[in-house]
Amino acid sequence: MKKSWLALLAVPVVAYPVAAWYLGSQVESTLSAQYQQAETLPYLKVVERTYERGVFSATESVTIELFGAMMQMMQQANPDAPPAEPLRIRFRSQIQHGPFAGGALAAAVVDSQLVLDASTQAEVAKLFGNNTPLTSHTVFKLDGSGTATVLSPAFATQFPNPDTGEAVNIAWEGIRATVDFAPGMTRYSMTGDAPRLEVKDPAGAHMVMSGLRFTGEQQRLFDDEPLLFSGTQRITIDAVQMNLPEEDAGQVSVKQITYDVDMPAEGDFIDMVARMGAQTVDIGGTNYGPAHYDVSLKHLHARTVAKLYRELLAAYSSPAMIGPNANPQLALAPLAEPAMALLGHNPVVALDRFSFTTPHGNAHLDLRAAAPGITPEAMANPGQLMAVLDAGANIALPEALLLSLAKDRASAQLAAMSETGTVSDDDLQMVAAQFEGKLQELSGQGFITRDGGVIKSTLAFKAGQLTVNGKPFNPMAMQ
């Protein structure tokens, strides 16, 4: 009986190291897969990786090179130029194996930090002191999912103004981001914040950004395309305030800023919708908020988007994009084929909303454009392109705003012709009368409507015909 109890007690003693060793091997494989995915980026390469795994812990060191191939090709193209060294970043990680890593039920706990060479560390220490500039803490669960928290600490420093040599003060309160991920990073959610950034120049220029926060929910679209995700992302900023003494605006204050990106997927297609807005846009004492700018690309063929994105990444990693012999047109040429293929799936491009407040009232514009059945031949032929183009717009502008713009334009022209360089009240009244006459003419023809001091109109272009408020319109007749 005593031997039986001893045998039972020995089971967990033996099993735990076995479990820890197994989970350690699983975590090593997971990390290796993550680096393989990262290397699908054309500008990134893992140049060195060491992994020393024991039973209960492991140590990893990884060096990543950015834009290495581009730098090498630039050097070959210009052998007399100074050597262009690629950017290399090294991370060191301490890994604790489960099943109770870090005091919790987990496959592993990974603590990583950025490692710098001695000369770079001396420069970075001027900002961060003894603090590490970038760290992460990752907990891998038993099923391969996990949570990662990335931190960069606060710092305050000075740097010389390149024009005056005077010291510019900069204070940064750090950034924190947390990512919850599924096994294999097939989906993830993200939250983070950066409380405050302040830059102050002795000449009086002053900028403060406060309350930056970001969130995201992403789902990988295709198993064989690790870089293409659908979902949502959101960035909000409480306020950006600037004092620009040398500019006409003087002071600029933008508050309650939002930036939302939504990429829903349906079948073989995805949409890309971006919405930007601010409740307050105060420029020189005039508030133009609330202001909104919403754009969208809809009915995009997802596989073609993935191919276009790959080509775009390769283009921006090409030496033809930068340097003394740069040829961006050559670098971007490979994008033509997937771009044309994307147009062949009948996408819709839209400015869903562009609106802002003026001292004269609210202004609004929206427009959309599509080219159903477009072909490469039609893209090269303006006549064929106009035949398939389907576009429209809605416009609402305050009459007082348009009158103010008309007066400003006419005043500049009349002042240039005047011997004294001034414009009389009679001249401005004449401009106002001409403006009113033109509005009455357009309203009588049905091209605009006047509603409570707001001018409204709807434009459409289809089958080669332009209509305004449903009436055929010839722009040449307005000359």
Image (cartoon, grey):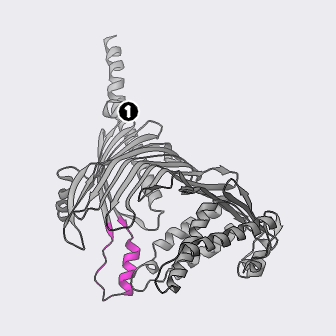
Residue position for label 1: 99
Q: Residues within 10 Å of mark 1 (few under 14, many from 20)?
A: many
Front in this rendered view, residue 86 or 276: 276
The quarter in which the C terminus is drawn is: bottom right
Q: Quadrant of residue 425?
A: bottom right
Relative image position of residue 400 (x, y in whole percent) = 60, 61
The quarter in which the N terminus is drawn is: top left
Front in this rendered view, residue 84 or 462: 462
Q: Determine whether, in the image, residue 38 is placed left or right of residue 347.
A: left
Residue 57 seen by the camera: yes
Q: Determine whether, in the image, residue 29 is placed left or right of residue 244.
A: right
Residue reaching furthest bottom?
Answer: 80
Q: Quadrant of residue 253?
A: bottom left
Q: Is residue 36 magenta?
A: no
Q: Quadrant of residue 380?
A: bottom right
Relative image position of residue 25 (x, y in whole percent) = 39, 44
Relative image position of residue 405 (x, y in whole percent) = 57, 69
Examine the rendered structure and indicate whether residue 148 appears above or below residue 312.
above
Front in this rendered view, residue 312 or 474: 474
Q: How many marks?
A: 1
Relative image position of residue 341 (x, y in whole percent) = 68, 69
Examine the rendered structure and indicate whether residue 225 appears above or below residue 232.
below
Q: Is residue 85 magenta?
A: yes
Query: What residue lies at 18% left-to-right and 65% top-to-bottom?
Result: 119
Query: What residue lies at 21% left-to-right and 64% top-to-bottom?
Result: 159
Residue span colored magenta: 65-87
Q: Which amino acid lies under the numbered mark 1 shown in the image of this protein?
A: Pro
Residue 54 seen by the camera: no
Q: Determine whether, in the image, residue 103 is placed left or right of residue 42.
A: left
Q: Which element carries disc 1, helix, strand or loop?
A: loop
Query: What residue lies at 61% left-to-right and 66% top-to-bottom?
Result: 403
Q: Determine whether, in the image, residue 395 is placed left or right of residue 18.
A: right
